[in-house]
Amino acid sequence: MAKYKKRMKPRKRALAIVFLSFLIIVGVTFSIGRYWVEIIEKYQEKQELEKELTSLKEKEEELQVDANKLQNPDYVARYAREKYLYSKDGEYILQIPDE
């Protein structure tokens, strides 16, 4: 019977090593998977922010052009007449309906 107990001990030890190895492999795989998901999400967020940055730069250029135009008094007067229906003294404004 003493021989029987000696054989079981190495089997239990081997089983414990296999079980711990399995747990370590599963844990490492789970961690790596979680980081990959995080990396993919950050990459997608980066692409969205780059698109937003591009559109904001275009809008900034348009606004800069408008700001430069507003420095011209003739442009401001014409813009006010067209947009807000202001008129000079003696002028009449006729609105034509859009089709």
Image (tube, rainbow, N blue to C red):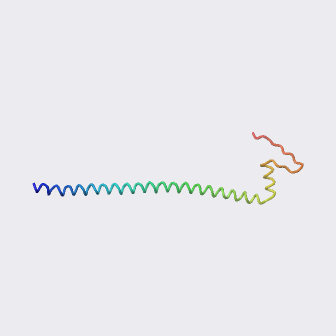
In this view, the residue in front, 72 or 3, is 3
30 lies left or right of 81: left
Q: Position of residue 12 (x, y in %)?
A: 20, 55
In this view, the residue in front, 56 or 8, is 8
Q: What residue sits 48% from the left and 54% below the top? A: 41
Look at the picture and state if 92 lies above or below 68: above
Q: Quadrant of the N terminus?
A: bottom left
| Name of the residue lying farthest toward the top | 99
83 lies left or right of 54: right
Q: What residue sits 33% from the left and 54% below the top? A: 26
Q: What residue sits 30% from the left and 55% below the top? A: 22
Q: Quadrant of the C terminus?
A: top right
Number of numbered markers: 0
Q: Position of residue 71 (x, y in %)?
A: 77, 60
| Name of the residue lying farthest toward the right | 90
Q: Position of residue 51 (x, y in %)?
A: 57, 55
62 lies left or right of 11: right
In this view, the residue in front, 90 or 8, is 8
69 lies left or right of 48: right
Report which quarter residue 97 is drawn in. top right
Q: What residue sits 32% from the left and 56% below the top? A: 25
Report which quarter residue 48 is drawn in. bottom right
Q: Position of residue 30 (x, y in %)?
A: 37, 54
